[in-house]
Amino acid sequence: MILSGDVGGTKTLLGVFEPAASRPRLVTTASYVTNAYHSFTDILDEFDRVAAQHGTIDAVVVGVAGPVIGGVSRLTNISWDISAAEIRTHRGIRHVELLNDLEAIANSVELLTGDEVAVLQPGVSRTDGNGAVIAAGTGLGQAYLHRVNGRMRPVPSEGGHADYAARTDREIEFVRMLREQFGRAEVEQVLSGPGLINLHRFTHRGGECDMLAGAASHELPARISQAGLTGRCQQCAEALRMFVSAYGAEAGNLALRAVATSGLYVGGGIAPKILPALQTGTFMDAFVAKEPMRELLERVPVKVILNPEAGLIGAAVHAQSLIA
Ligand SMILES: [Zn+2]
């Protein structure tokens, strides 16, 4: 059996999978509040109560929201590190690997079924091209899928911390606000839950908004996008519109960098919650507005990943390859 994990700044998902020819079969899964534990092995011990009855674990692969260097990852906003060596020693398992969380999602995209994605642009998928994944959630992740010897090979990146590229006078004003506050404007400060809060602050300058009354801080991004989707607050609606347009533009940047003619996938927790806003055309208009590359981008298949377990599945795919 395979144990796979998806460790985020907010939530940790663990799953047991049975190896299978096409796609590993999920046997059981559980979700934990990351910050409520002192180490990853504490979460593993807790999961054992569920997992132990499903047989011997032969491989463990965990996707982590952060760079993985030398088998170790330090999570943003979490006080503990996670290391492959720690898991290997703790569990006495030889096959243990950490992946960047977007690298894990990238491992799953070719196996997702039609009902696990929403198509924003059908495009024409090339079997000899590259792919890419972008995912806004607690932070912003990006990964490449490079075609090597006919197969797509996931490659992690820290592209979410690259500079935010403003395209309009309004966005340039927003960059000024971000620079005043953070010293620089990185794309994650726009495309993430905290990014939605930054956009909310920007569009409500000098104006009131009662949409956030009584909300805990972790509920703010969902409140803003809800108020934007329903149009109950005009400034919230502008914040969501700016978010969607910037998301499309950055997805287009990533598609250009990867030459993602096999497909661009939008993952992360935010996209499924704002799907109607992603389908209005604002996202795709910004995605393709990259003359002289419009024609290339209009042929890129663009899909939103709806299955929240894509990272878990992708980590299991990689684990399966370790014991094959
Ligand atoms: Zn508002």
Image (cartoon, grey):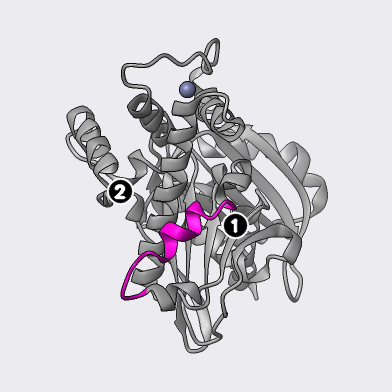
Give the residue at mark 2: 161
Which one is closest to the eye, mark 2 or mark 1?
1
- What kind of residue is marked 1? Val
Q: Position of residue 138 (x, y in %)?
A: 47, 38
Q: Is residue 228 above or below residue 121?
A: above
Residue at the top extreme, as displayed: 214
Q: Position of residue 185 (x, y in %)?
A: 24, 41
Asked if the magenta segment contains residue 291, the reply would be yes
- What kind of residue is marked 2? His
Q: Earlier along the polypeptide chain: callout 2 or callout 1? A: 2
Q: Position of residue 127 (x, y in %)?
A: 56, 86
Kindly tell me whether residue 96 is visible in this rendering.
Answer: no
Q: Nearer the viewer, residue 64 or 165?
A: 165
Q: Nearer the viewer, residue 258 or 99?
A: 258
Distance between the alpha carbons at the discs numbered 2 and 1: 22 Å
Q: Is residue 180 above or below residue 54?
A: above
Q: Position of 314 compared to 186: left or right?
A: right
Range of magenta residues: 279-293
Give the residue at mark 1: 304
Q: Is residue 305 above or below residue 243?
A: below
Q: Nearer the viewer, residue 120 or 222?
A: 120
Q: Nearer the viewer, residue 301 or 47?
A: 301
